[in-house]
């Protein structure tokens, strides 16, 4: 069997299960081999019935007590069994498995592993895995069992079975990584790594397997970028940019002076745009460092030189905000260029009209979401494309926007706090500018980490701030009430808070399930201070800029990653007012406390990213990652920084030796790169 074989060739996979696997992105045996576990379960020692705890997956061993019974209705048959040990009796339930009645009819000792739930005041075990007779458990005891990411219809067991076959039957004749590379980097071969990641005997095996697979992942990624850059670097700047006096005047009209860092970055951008080669530049700057105005300067520069410029933002809320800011400035400063908004939720007619203005060149600055890269949007003389919050976009999308022009200048803005050395590897196809300075009028945000008992005090504090003319954000993790999670939700929260505060305070909610027009209305009203408290989900996480807001309160702060919390906090402290961030947490865990303390003591995104790394460390190998930044399948740019660097160096050596990867030993790599680009494989990564 080859990696390219279809999964139907595996035993037990028919038409129906093939479809289910395909929905999870698994079409070939190779896909299956690379469907890595997201973590591992350890089959721990069984506990007694008295030790069982609700909500946990546990193992219990005892005698089958009484008869196995099948009840329920024909469509949902329920099999029940009682297991007894010295400490008590446990009821066990299986759904739709009536045949167990026969299997378990022999009595004797059984071991069961499953989730413990509470039913009518009693603990029950639901749908457990069966080890019968109990000695069968001994084979698994203390072993690591892979836990796979699942989609509807796909069970862990099904994946495990299929992967097991795939590992056994695939002929691993050709390793993607040439032997000399594996030797020099001390990497396992593919077969060893794959069987190690799926079926490890111990943690060391996972470690070695992961090392090889992460290296491979990084190497392919970097090579993909470099190979492309190799082609692009040659591109000469086809545009004719001249200095324009209106720029200097614009800078005078701004209500503030640019920071030194903003000036320096603008200088670099201007030189690029006037230079011999087309610009590909990343502007990195912490939240609130003032990236928008720098992007705007570049767009203005393009417009004044008779070209179009496009700005793509990840959310409609953010796109509209940018559009409004630009409209306001142009009106106020008497700039005659015309902006246009283009988003997915616009009516078909509005879109058509916008498209025709864009195609005719009647508008110069085009601001929007993904809608900007749709096929029917045709630009006229597009000389600059900007992507804001670029980590929210795929390379492919950036690429698509680029292809809308002849070969436009590219500017990407990011607040992702990754160290410069990493950025240089990861964003190998971009030059990097850093805005490492906040505007001078800023007072550092004051933070506090509190438990829910502090809520009333927080509300009193917010009232005071509102009386001073300020506004507040409150973030909740959920939109609506959920039966499974005990966390705050935006809808109920807004209602309760309105009641608590009484009249005189306008509290409104904002979340992703609302209609776009509603969201726009709410954001608009909030930015005009017609709403004093905005209760929102993380839809406002990136980019939103209402400088009058001075309080950010995050409910269930324990549920968010550090990077995300930092971004959320970045919504305040954007103006001259003293701002506050309240991290509220219902959790008493030490780990949560330590994590939140980091934010409590620092407002510096780079420092926070570093601490995040230190905290999670290699120990998180067995946890589930939630950073959201540069999500590789296995690799993590922070945790695996060493491997990333090694892969970067290896990529350089390979390309020096063989710039277009034509040697036979790189044939497989070339093939994979070609396929990946076709399948948008890196879409989610950058
Ligand atoms: P980000 O880098 O997070 O995108 P923005 O560009 O949205 O930040 O800027 C945040 C706020 O700071 C905006 O309200 C903007 O008008 C203001 N701002 C930008 N540059 C300066 C500056 N040099 N001095 C004072 N305020 C500034
Ligand atoms: Mg921004």
Image (cartoon, rainbow, N blue to C red):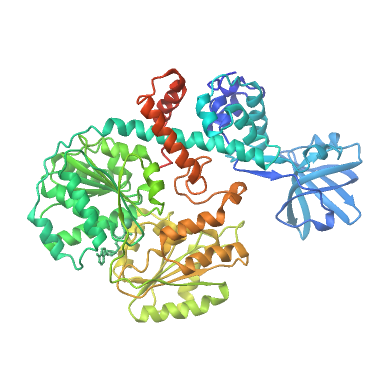
Q: Which of 568/54 is in front?
A: 568
Q: Which of 432/145 is in front?
A: 432
In the image, residue 188 above or below residue 622: above
Q: Which residue is drawn at 75% across and 57% down?
A: 53
In the image, residue 159 above or below residue 608: above
Q: Residue at x 86, y 38 (%)?
A: 135
Q: Residue 488 occupies which quadrant of the picture?
A: bottom right
Q: Quadrant of ligand 2?
A: bottom left
Q: Residue 539 occupies which quadrant of the picture?
A: bottom left
Q: Which residue is drawn at 59% across and 31% down?
A: 188
Residue 671 position, x and y percent, is: 43, 23
Q: Residue 318 occupies which quadrant of the picture?
A: bottom left
Please state if 60 lies on the left or on the right of 562 as rendered: right
In the image, residue 369 above or below residue 441: above
| Farthest front residue in view | 184
Please state if 154 lies on the left or on the right of 670 as rendered: right
Please state if 337 lies on the left or on the right of 346 as rendered: left
**Quarter of the figure with the N terminus:** top right
Residue 496 position, x and y percent, is: 50, 72
In the image, residue 91 above or below residue 557: above
Residue 398 position, x and y percent, is: 32, 40
Q: Is residue 335 visible?
A: no
Q: Is residue 594 visible?
A: yes
Residue 381 position, x and y percent, is: 15, 39
Q: How many labels does the image show?
A: 0
**Quarter of the figure with the C terminus:** top left
| Farthest left residue in view | 245
């Amino acid at each position: 069997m080859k990696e390219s074989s279809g999964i139907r060739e595996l035993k037990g996979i028919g038409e129906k299960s093939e479809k289910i696997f395909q929905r999870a992105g698994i079409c070939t045996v190779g896909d299956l081999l690379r469907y890595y576990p997201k973590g591992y379960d350890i089959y721990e020692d069984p506990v007694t019935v008295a030790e069982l705890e609700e909500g946990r997956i546990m193992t219990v061993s005892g005698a089958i007590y009484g008869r196995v019974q099948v009840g329920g209705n024909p469509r949902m048959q329920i099999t029940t069994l009682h297991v007894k040990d010295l400490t008590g009796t446990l009821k066990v339930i299986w759904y739709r498995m009536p045949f167990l009645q026969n299997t378990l009819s022999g009595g004797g000792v059984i071991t069961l592993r499953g989730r413990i739930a509470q039913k009518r005041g009693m603990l029950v075990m639901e749908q457990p895995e069966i080890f019968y007779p109990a000695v069968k458990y001994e084979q698994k005891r203390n072993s690591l069992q892979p836990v796979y990411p699942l989609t509807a219809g796909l069970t862990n067991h099904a994946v495990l079975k299929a992967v097991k076959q795939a590992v056994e039957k695939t002929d691993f004749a050709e390793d993607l990584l040439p032997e000399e590379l594996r030797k020099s980097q001390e990497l396992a071969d593919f077969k060893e790594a794959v069987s190690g990641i799926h079926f490890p005997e111990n943690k060391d095996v996972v470690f070695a397997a992961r090392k090889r697979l992460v290296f491979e992942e990084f190497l392919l990624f970097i090579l993909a970028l470099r190979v492309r850059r190799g082609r692009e670097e040659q591109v000469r700047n086809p545009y004719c940019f001249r200095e324009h006096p209106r720029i200097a005047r614009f800078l005078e009209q701004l209500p503030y002076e640019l920071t030194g860092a903003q000036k320096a970055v603008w200088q670099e951008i201007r030189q690029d745009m006037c230079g011999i080669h087309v610009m590909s530049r990343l502007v990195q700057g912490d939240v609130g460092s003032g990236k928008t105005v720098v992007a705007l300067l570049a767009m203005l520069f393009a417009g004044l030189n008779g070209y179009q410029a496009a700005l793509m933002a990840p959310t409609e809320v953010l796109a509209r905000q940018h559009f409004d800011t630009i409209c306001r400035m142009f009106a106020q400063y008497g700039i005659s260029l015309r902006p246009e908004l283009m988003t997915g939720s616009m009516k078909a007619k509005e879109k058509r009209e916008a498209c025709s203005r864009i195609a005719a060149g009647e508008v110069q600055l085009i601001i929007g979401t993904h809608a900007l890269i749709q096929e029917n949007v045709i630009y006229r003389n597009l000389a600059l494309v900007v992507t804001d919050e670029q980590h929210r976009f795929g390379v492919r999308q950036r690429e698509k926007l680029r292809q809308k022009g002849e070969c436009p200048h590219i500017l990407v803005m990011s607040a992702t706090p990754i160290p410069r050395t990493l950025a240089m590897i990861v964003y190998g196809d971009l030059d990097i500018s850093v805005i490492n300075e906040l505007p001078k009028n800023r007072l550092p945000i004051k933070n506090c980490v509190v438990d829910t008992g502090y809520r009333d005090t927080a509300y009193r504090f917010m009232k005071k701030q509102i009386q001073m003319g300020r506004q507040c954000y409150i973030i909740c993790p959920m939109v609506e009430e959920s039966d499974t999670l005990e966390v705050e939700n935006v809808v109920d929260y807004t209602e309760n808070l309105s009641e608590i505060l009484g009249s005189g305070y306008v509290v409104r909610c904002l979340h992703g399930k609302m209609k776009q027009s509603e969201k726009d209305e709410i954001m608009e009203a909030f930015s005009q201070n017609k709403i004093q408290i905005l209760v929102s989900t993380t839809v406002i996480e990136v980019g939103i800029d209402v400088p009058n807001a001075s309080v950010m309160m995050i409910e269930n702060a324990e549920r968010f990653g550090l990077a995300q919390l930092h971004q959320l906090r970045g919504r305040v402290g954007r103006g001259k007012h003293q701002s506050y961030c309240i991290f509220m947490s219902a959790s008493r865990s030490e780990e949560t406390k330590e994590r939140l303390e980091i934010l409590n003591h620092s407002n510096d995104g780079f420092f926070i990213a570093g601490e995040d790394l230190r905290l999670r460390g290699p120990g998180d190998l067995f946890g589930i990652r939630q950073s959201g930044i540069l999500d590789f399948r296995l690799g993590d740019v922070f945790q695996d920084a060493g491997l990333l660097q090694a892969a970067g160096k290896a990529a350089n050596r390979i390309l020096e030796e063989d710039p277009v990867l034509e040697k036979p030993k790189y044939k497989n790599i070339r093939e994979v790169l070609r396929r990946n680009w076709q399948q948008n494989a890196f879409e989610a990564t950058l």
